[in-house]
Image (spheres, rainbow, N blue to C red):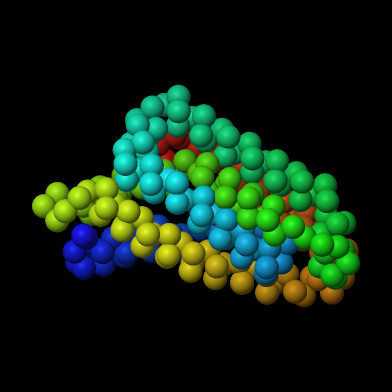
Amino acid sequence: MVSPESLLAFGLAAIVIIIIPGPGVLFVIGRSLALGRVGGLVSVIGGVLGQVPLVLAVAFGVGAVVAQSVVLFTIVKIAGAGYLVYLGAQAIRHRKRASRAATGTAPVSHRRQLAEGFIVGVTNPKTIAFFVAVLPQFVDLGAGWVPLQMLELGLVFLLLALLSDGAWALLAAAARGWFARSPRRIETLTATGGAMIIGLGGVLLLTGWRD
């Protein structure tokens, strides 16, 4: 079991990382602007669920192998960046559909939003790098089974990420409310959100693999 002191120290370190707008935050904002409050929150949940396999992989050693392999890490990064570009392009392409959805005339598949968030979460190389680099620093070899301690730390991170990303989603969705009064506004906003996600994919692809 992780000591209360280590949990507190890790929580503070995680908060610093989480609250700084990064790929996850920009994705949530983009989806909230394009899909509204419910869509944004579903995307948040999907993203957090997507990080669960990363926590498990790091806790049991797979994440460390990926982080030490340039080839594997690059594959993960390219896959994640490519998927973000795809999502952004789809948002721009279907902006009129999003406008109808905002007025309640078109259904929105929450299952698909959840799945998209999951894929983005599980293919985020920066999250893998954070887990591999930070989690081991708060593990006490004399405090019990190491994988269990890393799972506990990972759970703390996921809870904090859920709260932080959820807050960003609500803020972005609140701003979307004003735009939703006009179909043209919501189309523009949806396209803007899509462009943000495409830009995020480009930034993720161009950043150094150890960033």
Q: Is residue 192 left or right of residue 200?
A: right
Tell me if I can see residue 172 in this picture: yes
In the rendered image, which quarter is residue 108 located in?
A: bottom right
State the quadrant of the N terminus.
bottom left
Q: Position of residue 181 (x, y in %)?
A: 84, 74
Which residue: 88% across, 67% down?
A: 105
Which residue: 73% across, 69% down?
A: 176
Which residue: 59% across, 39% down?
A: 81
Tell me if I can see residue 24 in this picture: no
Residue furthest top in the image:
71
Q: Is residue 91 left or right of residue 126?
A: right
Q: Is residue 119 left or right of residue 164?
A: right
**Number of numbered labels in the structure image:** 0
State the quadrant of the C terminus.
top left
Residue furthest left in the image:
142
Q: Position of residue 100 (x, y in %)?
A: 87, 63
Q: Position of residue 104 (x, y in %)?
A: 84, 70
Which residue: 27% across, 48% down?
A: 147
Q: Position of residue 74 (x, y in %)?
A: 49, 30
Q: Nearer the viewer, residue 86 or 112?
A: 112
In the rendered image, which quarter is residue 3 located in?
A: bottom left
Q: Is residue 102 placed above or below 50 in the rendered structure?
A: below
Q: Nearer the viewer, residue 52 or 133?
A: 52
